[in-house]
Image (tube, rainbow, N blue to C red):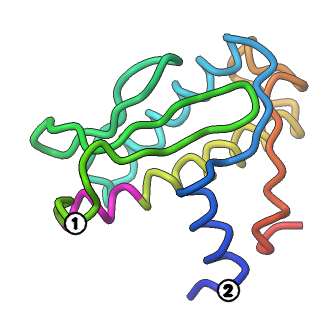
């Protein structure tokens, strides 16, 4: 069960984006690589995330795009490509799960950086920053 602070954070993430700091193009590329891996390995997410640093599409299990992710230098933005009432149940659920996957990906990368176990030379200690303490679960 999510507390009110966490629910508010997730709603703001979906509507206003997730604040972050990508130092360079390689950092964005690494984030995308990790995000796609997280989404692909999560058995509950039936959608896929395809694209590059210019934009990622959320595609349902039939290959129909319904959402997008835009990576800017200081924020990751989310948008629907179809009106919310027209989303299928799976698309709606997966949209939220993909936002959570983005948060998980930031947390994974920060953990790698703090532990010094960076699997990719491009994601060095200062290339990606995200303050997860705003959620209220991790401080």
Q: How many residues crowd around disc 2 within 10 Å: few (fewer than 14), some, or many (20 or more)?
A: few
Give the image quarter of residue 30.
top right
Q: Residue at x 68, y 11 (%)?
A: 26
Nearer to us: label 2 or label 1: 1
What is the span of residues highlighted in magenta in the rendered image?
Answer: 89-95
| Residue nearest the observer in this picture, 90 or 42 | 90
Q: Quadrant of the N terminus?
A: bottom right
Q: At 20% across and 45% down in the image, what residue appears?
A: 60
**Magenta stretch, overall SS:** helix
Question: Does residue 122 appear left or right of residue 69 in this picture?
Answer: right
Q: Is residue 48 left or right of residue 42?
A: left
Q: Is residue 76 left or right of residue 14?
A: right
- Labelled disc at residue 85: 1
User: Which residue is located at x 21 percent, y 59 percent?
Assistant: 87
**Helix, strand or loop at disc 2?**
helix
Within 10 Å of the Cα at label 1, are there few (<14), some (14-19), or many (20+) other Cα atoms?
few
Horizontal and vertical percent position of residue 42: 39, 52
Is residue 72 located in the magenta-colored stretch of the structure? Answer: no
**Residue beneath disc 2:** 4
Label 2 vs label 1: CA separation? Answer: 25 Å
């Amino acid at each position: 069960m999510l507390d009110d602070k966490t629910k508010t954070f997730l709603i703001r993430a979906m509507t206003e984006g997730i604040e972050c700091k990508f130092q360079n193009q390689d950092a964005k590329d690494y984030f995308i690589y990790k995000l796609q891996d997280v989404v692909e390995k999560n058995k509950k997410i039936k959608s896929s995330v395809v694209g590059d640093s210019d934009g990622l599409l959320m595609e349902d299990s039939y290959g129909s795009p319904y959402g997008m992710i835009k990576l800017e230098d200081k924020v990751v933005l989310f948008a629907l490509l179809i009106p919310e009432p027209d989303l299928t149940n799976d698309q709606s659920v997966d949209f939220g799960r993909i936002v959570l996957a983005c948060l998980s990906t930031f947390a994974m990368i920060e953990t790698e950086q703090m532990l010094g176990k960076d699997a990719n030379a491009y994601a060095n200690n200062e290339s990606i920053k995200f303050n997860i303490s705003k959620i209220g679960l991790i401080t």
